[in-house]
Image (cartoon, helix red, strand yellow):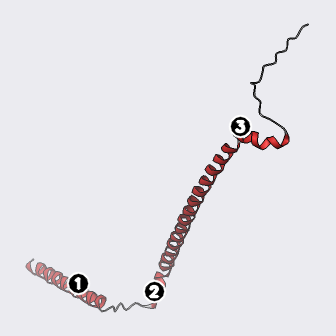
């Protein structure tokens, strides 16, 4: 029984040593940028790489599109401010031109004069 346990212990120690040795070799290769990729491995990863490429392209498109929308929004907000100020100035000019005195001055060349007496109410009685 002792013999079996000793054999299992020795094999488990060799597995641990072998794993640690493989790990250190992998770290050294990674640090030296020596990946040793085989063409078959690249071909196996090609669909995933294509998927990543499509995602990156969608991300770039989305960022460009959002920047364009932001620029368009800023331009339209500036245009709205300009149109609002133009509306207010036109409205104030119209209010000045529609005053009773301004209308009387414009109609005086046609012979139409301003009433001096207030208008009177005309009533009609229906006698039947």
Quadrant for the N terminus in the image: bottom left
> Disc 2 versus disc 1: distance between alpha carbons?
25 Å
Which disc number belongs to residue 100?
Answer: 3
11 displayed left or right of 83: left
Q: Element under label 2?
A: helix
Return the disc, 2 or 1, that comes first in the chain's sequence.
1
> Disc 3 versus disc 2: distance between alpha carbons?
87 Å
Q: Quadrant of residue 12?
A: bottom left
Residue at the spot 83% in from the left edge and 43% down from the top edge = 109
Return the disc, 3 or 2, that comes first in the chain's sequence.
2
The image position of residue 47, as x and y in percent, is 50, 78
Which disc number belongs to residue 79?
Answer: none
Which disc number belongs to residue 42?
Answer: 2
Q: Vertically, is 19 above or below 100?
A: below
103 displayed left or right of 128: left
Q: Which residue is mark 1?
A: 19
- In the image, 92 versus 4, the foreground residue is 92
Q: Vertically, is 9 above or below 71?
A: below
């Amino acid at each position: 029984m002792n013999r079996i346990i000793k054999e299992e212990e020795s094999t488990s120690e060799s597995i641990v040593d072998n794993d640690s040795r493989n790990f250190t070799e992998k770290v050294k290769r990674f640090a030296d940028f020596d990946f040793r990729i085989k063409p078959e491995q690249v071909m196996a990863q090609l669909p995933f790489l294509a998927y990543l490429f499509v995602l990156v392209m969608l991300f770039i498109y989305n960022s460009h599109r959002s920047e364009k929308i932001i620029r368009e929004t800023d331009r339209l907000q500036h245009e709205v401010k300009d149109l609002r100020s133009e509306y207010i100035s036109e409205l104030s000019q119209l209010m000045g031109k529609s005053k009773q005195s301004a209308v009387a001055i414009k109609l005086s060349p046609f012979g139409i004069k301003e009433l001096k007496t207030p208008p009177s109410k005309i009533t009609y009685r229906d006698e039947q």
